[in-house]
Image (cartoon, rainbow, N blue to C red):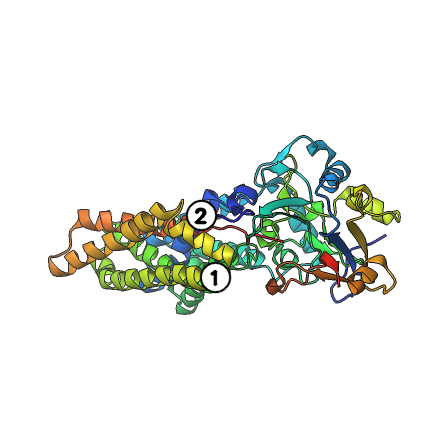
Amino acid sequence: MTPADLHYQVDVAHWGWSIAWFLWFVGIAGMGSVAYYFVRRAPLAYVIFGSLAIGLLLVVSHLGRWWNLPRVLWIMVINLDFNFNSWMLIGIMMLSVHLFMTLFIVIAHLPFLTNRFGWLGWTKALNASNLYLVLYAALGAGATVYSGFLITQAAGVPLWNTSLIPVLWVISGSVAAIAVLELLYVFGLVDARVSSFGVRLGMGLDVLKLLAVLGFLHVALSFGSAGARFGAELMTSGEYALMTWGGVIGIGILIPLAIGAYTIFVGKSKPLLLVSSVAALAGVFFLRAAVLLAGVWEPLVL
Amino acid sequence: MSTRLRRGQAPTRRMAHIWDASRCIACGACVMACTQANAPEMMFREEKGWKSLASNIRRIDSVSPHGRPELLLVQCQHCENAPCISTCPFGATYYDTDGRVRLDPARCAGCSYCVTSCPYNVRWLHPDNKLPKKCMGDGCIDLTDSGQHPACVQACPAMARDYGDLNDPSSSVSVTLRTKRSRRLLEATGSEPKFFVVEGSR
């Protein structure tokens, strides 16, 4: 039964598609940074940088009063008044640092820059430093976790008030990072060795993601408040059921799993890998969009 | 006149709203008075998300399991543990020295985090300036700073509304809460709201 006082957050707060894309880009960049620690290839660094830049642009463009941002930052800095209780503030700081750390890595991969401007040589030293790359990977994982806690902290939307979301975001972000590596391999931008560790790991993550998605829905449906339950119903049998079953699970998990199994038993096929990685990336996006759009407030009754 | 509460400072007063459901006749005067006092430019415009008049008071009509029509009027609860203050990344939402939750437009970038963080869904985005509006608006702040009641309390013909200091045992709200049966909404969220729904005599 639909409660009398039912309001979708997207209608009132307008956290819609642009935030879903933002969360998607942060997932790719965040867990992509962890993957970078292992593979250290330039094309991956470019993808991470692009994802971060687009993600940050999206989030700034989503601000209703973006033109007031410089003034807001100025007031915060001159008063030394920072609300570190806010995941949004923590996250934006993390993403800004992450963007600069990625920029240094990107520069290190551009010999025409480092050769022409010798003083940029330190970026190559950073890119060769295990310590720097460990910090970089940790910051990436942290940014992905942040993007989960960002919505978990929104107390008005009970569907989101669960620690499963950051976990789900990390798992699906890892799926996205592996899908990016597979795509880079398909387009000949990285060698087969880089891609080879992805198939089995990707399948394992797909299974974990399936469990986490079903667990998230089960907990909300069985033990959640009325608002959480209604949001989960929107995802399982309501307005966003097609996005959940078709997009998140069908396209995002089952297709990559099937192609992964084929790859293990029959052999690697670039066209199939292309389908698998695009499907996995689409599934990661659908997951974020469905969870966001299904957010409703707790219905109030007398 | 109330000012921004500094970190670690306790509010001098704890101003609270009361809505007496047993007296309310559902005329909607408080809703209209609120818009007229705080956002007169919205008098004939809809809050699209709520599909109702853009006002800092939200009207919820429902039907009880026994088929009886029911009404609930909600507004900012001026929570003592306000989620919107915790989440605001820029410190735009703050407590004033009267314990009220206020908004500083100069520090607001329009991220809507306060809107999604409010368990009561009582913030709405102004379509022109994109500020997350809520009770109390500038009009009511001016009224209370000059010693008057907020617009909704003044407009109510059934005396179903009241506003006063919980720290003052002789204030009308303290007396009402001592003598009448009341409850707070969504207490499980831990937000410690200061909006009381009076349900009748004890």
Residue density around tag 2, few if under 14, some if 14–19, many if 20 or more, within 10 Å: many
Image x and y of residue A53, in percent: 46, 47
Mark pair 1, 2: CA separation:
23 Å
Left/right of residue A285 with respect to residue A193 in the rendered view: right
Residue A120 visible in the snapshot: no
Residue B188 is labelled as: none
Camera-side residue: A97 or B151?
B151
Residue A289 appears in the figure: yes
Chain bearing mark 1? A
Closer to the observer: label 1 or label 2? 1
At label 1, the amino acid type is Gly
A292 or A39, which lies in front?
A292
SS for dot 1: loop
Q: Position of residue A277 (x, y in %)?
A: 27, 51
Residue that sits furthest to the front in the current view: B66
> Looking at the picture, does residue B31 appear above or below residue B41?
below
Helix, strand or loop at label 2? It is: helix
The disc labelled 2 sits on which kind of residue?
Ala
Q: Of B46 and B20, which appears nearest the observer?
A: B20
Instruction: Give the labeled residue for mark 1.
Output: A224
Please give the count of numbered marks on the rendered protein: 2
Mark before the other along the chain sequence, 1 or 2? 2
Residue of label 2: A20
- At 34% from the left and 46% from the top, the residue drawn is A242
Closer-to-camera residue (A22/A161): A161
| Rendering quarter of residue A40 | bottom left
Q: Is residue B164 above or below residue B156?
A: below
Residue at point 23%, 60% (across, down): A199
To which chain does the residue with label 2 belong?
A: A
- Is A128 placed left or right of A53 in the picture? left
What residue is shown at x 35% (from left), y 60% (from top)? A214
